[in-house]
Amino acid sequence: MNRQEEVDKVLDALRGDGYPGDDSIVEMAVATFHGRRRWLTAVTWAMSFVWFAVAVWCAVRFFDAPETRHQIAWATGFLFSMMAVTALKIWAWMDMIHTSTMRQLRRVEAAVVRLAEGR
């Protein structure tokens, strides 16, 4: 039996497992709160909301600033806050992808074990 036939058997076993296909974005995001690092995910999302609130506050203060120097300071605060939000969201996306990949690997591993026991 060649490699392609083995891969086809594993894929058939996965399809027969009731696996619906790809997860939605919401399912992937919720799944990050169920692993061992759920506290880190919660802290990351909370900090993302905090930094976004800081960015909104800096934007509002920017328009109330009396001098150009103050406007530059508030604009810098806004840009820094938005960069922090972006960095935290990138980490969250990477964590979602990691969680999804690990789930897929577990499914493939289970299918291989079932195939190995069936021989």
Image (spheres, rainbow, N blue to C red):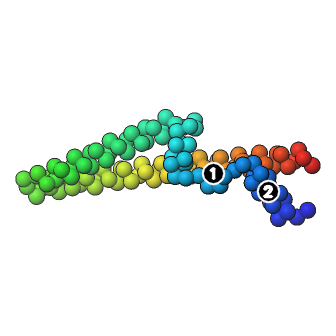
Q: Residue furthest left?
A: 66
Identify which residue is drawn at 30% across, 50% down: 81
Horizontal side, residue 107 vs residue 82: left or right: right
| Image depth: mark 2 or mark 1 in front | 2
Q: Secondary structure at mark 1?
A: helix
Q: Which residue is mark 1?
A: 101
- Could you tell me if residue 64 is visible in this image? yes
Q: CA distance from mark 2 to mark 1?
A: 19 Å
Identify which residue is drawn at 88% across, 64% down: 2
Q: Residue 51 appears at what percent x and percent y?
A: 32, 45
Q: Amino acid at mark 2?
A: Asp
Q: Amino acid at mark 1?
A: Thr
- Could you tell me if residue 96 is visible in this image? no
- Tell me: residue 35, above or below residue 102: above
Name the one closer to the observer, 34 or 78.
34
Give the numbered dot on residue 12.
2
Identify which residue is drawn at 54% across, 47% down: 27
Q: Earlier in the sequence, mark 2 or mark 1?
A: 2
Give the numbered dot on residue 117.
none
